[in-house]
Image: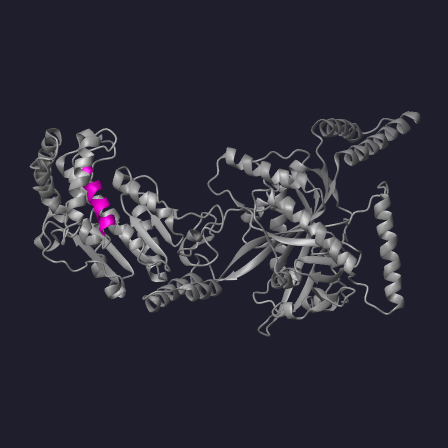
Amino acid sequence: MNFQSDIAAVCGNTIFTEDKREQKWYEFSGFHTSFDSENQLALHFQDLRRLFKEINREIHCLIVPVRQSLDDVRDQYLEAVRGNLRVVAKEHVDAIFDYLKTSSELGAEENKSKFYIGIELTKGTVTDEDDEMSFGEIFEYISDWFKEKFHKVRGKSTYLTVERFQRALRAGREVDNVLKAFPFHFKKLSCEEMGKLIPWMFNLGVRYPQGWKGWEERFTPITNKKGEIIARVQTKEEVLNLQMTGIENPKGRRHLTLHQTDAKGGNHQTHVSYLHLVKMPDTIYFPDIRWLENLRNLPFGVGVSLKMTYQSPDKRIAKLRRQKDNLKDQVEHLRQFNDEASSNVYEGLALAEEVISNVEKERDGSYLMSAIFAVSAPNLDLLSVRVKDLIEEYASIGFRLQNTYGLQLRSLMECLPGSKRYVTEFIQDVDVNAVTASFFGNRQELGDDYGAYLARTLEGKPVYYMPGLAASGTVATQSLVMVATGKTGGGKSVGGNHITYESALAGAKVMLLDPKAERKNLCHWDEKLTELGTELNFISFTNKDEDAGKLDPYLLFENRQDAGDIAREIINYLLNINIRNNSMQSSVVARAVRQVSQRKKPSIRFVKEELRIIATDTEMTEEKRNIALNLASTLEELESISLARLIFAEPTNTDNVLNYANQLNVLQVDNLHLPNKDTPPEEYSEDNIISVAILFSLTAYMIRFMKMFPNDLTMIAIDEAWNFFQNPAGERLIGVNPASSSESVIS
């Protein structure tokens, strides 16, 4: 079947059409509402409503189903894996994805959707005979007409003049500025991405579409009067090459058959039916109805094309009044013949009055919308089932879809970017609220496009996790912190362990704080995770002699200033000194720590000794000498607690306990007695106080770890984090975390 394209040329993400329109295309990243309350949904609704209300141009919204193979997800993930466990990661990932492909959990493929918006830069596809052209528009039209005739006489191409290109460029900048005002992300499509989008309707059901690779190089230059190249465009011929697909319009004429060839040379036959939205409810109640979300209830992908031409409030009111007058004329005409109009006519009059009143009050425009749903299948029996399922799904919310005889080819052409309106029978005048209630762009997918497989959602959609992707901080919704929260026994630790393990396999440098030592003593990671080999490093802190002094800040930090700061924090906490309320005590401790830092071999255990030296210093006031003596005595009592040996005892093994090359490091402290969340600080036991003091050193340890690998993803995982972050030691880690975009914390 002969197929002609409406596109004259493509430049970047802008389409120039044969009928003198220019259309700029963006990928709409949309918004996530998986865990939103009704108030949050209402905020999304208002933002989307403002977009449709203020854009004031014709727009073409597309939902493009994407067939994502699990093999593609796996390959893309494995390409991103780094670190010392790449071989283990490949075996692990292959085993999981091979299982998923053969199980009923997911199957070999999954359906996803991408959202696109095309915005008309100049005129639209709906012409209104009542519209009056301004003098400037008349002059521009006549000027373009003469230039086109002149170029034809001289044998020059007329598909894109310099003036038209520059006019589209100016209009495109205006649209960009308008879109920047909204809390959404609109990505300008690259030349390669346009090469994928333009023929999207011909690639339904094809995993590896052909034609778009190298499309950017197949350009034609546009020059100005000086012969300078001002643009590189793809011509109509190149567009048609993208769309080279055999189209069969069978006798039944309720579907088309596409004869496709993929990039690997494989031949495919895909049957496609195009259904039109022919009726909507008079009133749509949000958030009860979000009418594009119903597509998620279907086990197959559906393509959607929404062509919407904006009408100003005045134009809409004028049109409604004409319709109202027509209804009145019907009533009057029937009365002249002693007949009564049907109830539908009177209902139409009442509805027209109500709508006119609302528009005059709210000053809201409307959209002339045509909605087309494209359903595809590899065979006709499956296509029939899918069409029926789609019709029934929308009938359940009061929407009527119709598979119309004889409109299939025209429907296909209307779904393409840059197309004009080929099907005008079902254009509906809908208000902005009804358009917004589609909730176009709403995503409820969790996770990343590729990565480690974590689980599936209640809808059966897979959740992938790419370690470090959120830590890149490229958009506002990305965060450096992950939190696993829920009731006891809800799987927080299991989920945290899973993410930690997958991150280490992917190449992240991981440090896990395990205050209860459960990973080794309860979960037996050292026995079960043998595939990690020496990359699994348990760092245990006990009250044994070999661990004495291992958490001494001066042993952890080479920089004496950093070590002194940590030592001072520990001493102040142990002695309950507040720098604002106990300024004299604080200054005494600061002097003692400073003296320790100046020693040849400094250690926090010498602070007590320096305090006693201060107590005998005759140059100090008597008050300060007494304070120093009391502080030294209190510190000595606390040092006698067994766990305190980790900080204050003389080290017997000064080797660095942290192996920089390990992927997964687990910090464990035996007999750590952190206070309960509800226990006030004044009721802390001595063991509680020492345990919190140890956290200062552990925090310092983790901060040091975070800074060791500036070019790698570094993950700090903390079990029982609620207990950790309710004290000053945990607050210190929170304050440091945003310092690097390559760091991540999970709690």
Res 368 seen here = yes
> In front here: 588 or 488?
588
Q: Main SS type for the magenta part?
A: helix
Expressed as whole percent of the image width and height from the top left, the position of residue 475 reads 49, 49
Expressed as whole percent of the image width and height from the top left, the position of residue 179 reads 62, 45
The residue positioned 43% from the left and 52% from the top of the image is 470
Q: Find the residue positioned furthest to the right.
A: 336
The residue positioned 11% from the left and 35% from the top of the image is 619
Res 22 seen here = no
Occupied quadrant, residue 696: top left
Number of labelled discs? 0
> In front here: 527 or 403?
527
**Residue 76 falls inside the magenta stretch:** no
Magenta stretch in the rendered image: 560-572
Occupied quadrant, residue 673: top left
**Residue 561 falls inside the magenta stretch:** yes
> In front here: 610 or 220?
610
614 shown above or below 461: above
Expressed as whole percent of the image width and height from the top left, the position of residue 145 reads 87, 57
Instruction: Report the coloring of the rendering.
Output: one colour
Q: Is residue 250 left or right of residue 130?
A: left
261 shown above or below 421: below
The residue positioned 27% from the left and 43% from the top of the image is 720
Quarter of the figure with the N terminus: bottom right
Expressed as whole percent of the image width and height from the top left, the position of residue 452 reads 40, 58
